[in-house]
Structures are given as C-alpha cells and as structure tokens.
Amino acid sequence: EVHILESGGGLAQPGGSLRLSCAASGFTFRSHAMSWVRQAPGKGLEWVSSISGSGDKTYDADSVKGRFTISRDNSKNTMFLQMNSLRREDTAVYYCATYDNSGSHFDSWGQGTLVTVSS
Amino acid sequence: QLVLTQPPSASASLGASVNLTCTLSSGYSSAAIAWHQQQPGKGPRYLIKLNADGSHNKGDGIPDRFSGSSSGTERYLTISSLQSADEADYYCQTWDTGIQVFGGGTKLTVL
C-alpha cells in the first residue's frame, strides 16, 4: 500500500523561505516521477512542480519559477520543495503526488501540509 | 492553450446517477484526462484515467459505481447509486510536455 506523508509546513514571512518534505513508501520510489500540487484556501488544485524518477528533469509552474526548487533523494524515498522569496499568494495546503507508471497522471496523494505566508 | 473547464456545481439525489463534465480546450480532443475526488477536509484521491476513445483505468479500490466516457472534447465522470460519501469536489486533470493542468473543480451535492 502506498503511503505519502508531507511535512515542513508552517508560518513564514513574506520574502522568507520554507522547505517541504514528502516521505513515500509502498512502491519503487526511484521509478516514479513525483509532483507538488497546492490548494489555496477555498480554491481549486494548482500544479506547482514535477521531478522525474531519477531527478534529472524538473518542471515548474510559471507562478513559482525562479523561487521554488524541487528535488529528491532516492536513497531516502523523499522528495523536497525549497520555497524562497515567499509571497502571500503562496499560502496554501501543499500536496505531494505520485505519477502512475506511464508518467502521465497522478495516482496517489498525500494529506498535505499547510503553508501560511503572513507578517 | 491547454485548459480544462468544469461547471462549479452539480447536484443529484441519493441513489440516483450523476454525470460530471470536463471540457478540453479546442484542439485537444485526443487528450486523456484523470478524475480526482476530494472529500471535505481531505487530500485528493485518484479515481479514473479516461482516454479519448472512452477506454478507462480506475484506481485501486474504486467501486464500479464510478465510470467514465468521452465525446469530442468532453470527458464525463458518471457516478451511479449515489451515496452521501460521494458529496465532494471533483477535479479533472490533463497533461502536456512538462506541465499539468487542473480544471476548476465541480462541487457535487447529494440531496
């Protein structure tokens, strides 16, 4: 059974930084691309960043490009999101999601971690 | 530009069936999508991947009450024998090289 657990959320000031972690188990971690998806309060889902299974390819939404960096440590079955230059509009629950074997859509999700950007 | 459009709300009675719609932008009639369910206060759950020809693959443990179909740029999620637990937000998702796109979501109310 797949288990995904996000951590690292909390309160940050505008312009500040946070690092999110996503620990996964129950599947061959290095064989699956992974992604971060966020949901602002009362809003829909927004894709943030994706990373290939080996970690050599990354993709970012325009809204976070140049500020957020996705990475992974396959030896620890963990993915990360380094968030710098945080803005109030980055306030959201951040979900970790796994891609299916074909690398197209998400087929497993975590429960999310809340990031609040406020002074 | 790749865009998914969903009506913001839908409703149906307990025990009845409902069709939720997700519309792809023009030029993307061959695209596959995925449907995800988000119950109140919870993370999303993957339901089904739906191809342009109507073939589909469901996530582990997803009951037969959930099915999908396609027509042109429209992708449908049908939920039959509605239960109170089906009251949730439903999101469609599609993808292109390097990007993922979500629809705005449909809030389903079970009357």
Image (cartoon, coloured by chain):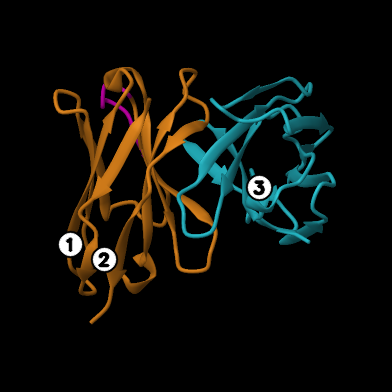
Chain colours: A orange, B cyan
**Residue A19 in the image: x percent, y percent?**
18, 52
The CA span between labels 1 and 2 is: 6 Å
Magenta residue span:
A53-59
Under tag 2, what secondary structure? loop
The chain containing the residue under callout 3 comes to B
Q: Name the residue at 32% across, 61% down.
A: A114
**Residue A83 in the image: x percent, y percent?**
23, 55
- Left or right for B66, reference A75: right
Residue A114 forms part of the magenta stretch: no
In this orientation, which residue lies closer to the viewer: A100 or B32? A100
- Asked if the residue at tag 3 contacts the one at tag 1, i.e. Cβ–Cβ closer than 8 Å, the answer is no
| Numbered circle sitting on residue B105 | none
- Asked if the residue at tag 2 contacts the one at tag 1, i.e. Cβ–Cβ closer than 8 Å, the answer is yes
Residue ID for mark 1: A17
- Left or right for B89, reference B55: left
The CA span between labels 2 and 3 is: 27 Å
Sort mark 2 into few (<14), some (14-19) or many (20+) by Cα contacts within 10 Å. Answer: many
The CA span between labels 1 and 3 is: 31 Å
Quarter occupied by residue B106: bottom right
The chain containing the residue under callout 2 comes to A
Q: Name the residue at 49% across, 18% down.
A: A102
The chain containing the residue under callout 1 comes to A
Q: Name the residue at 39% across, 69% down.
A: A89
Residue ID for mark 3: B3
In this rendering, the answer to whether A41 lies above or below B37 is below
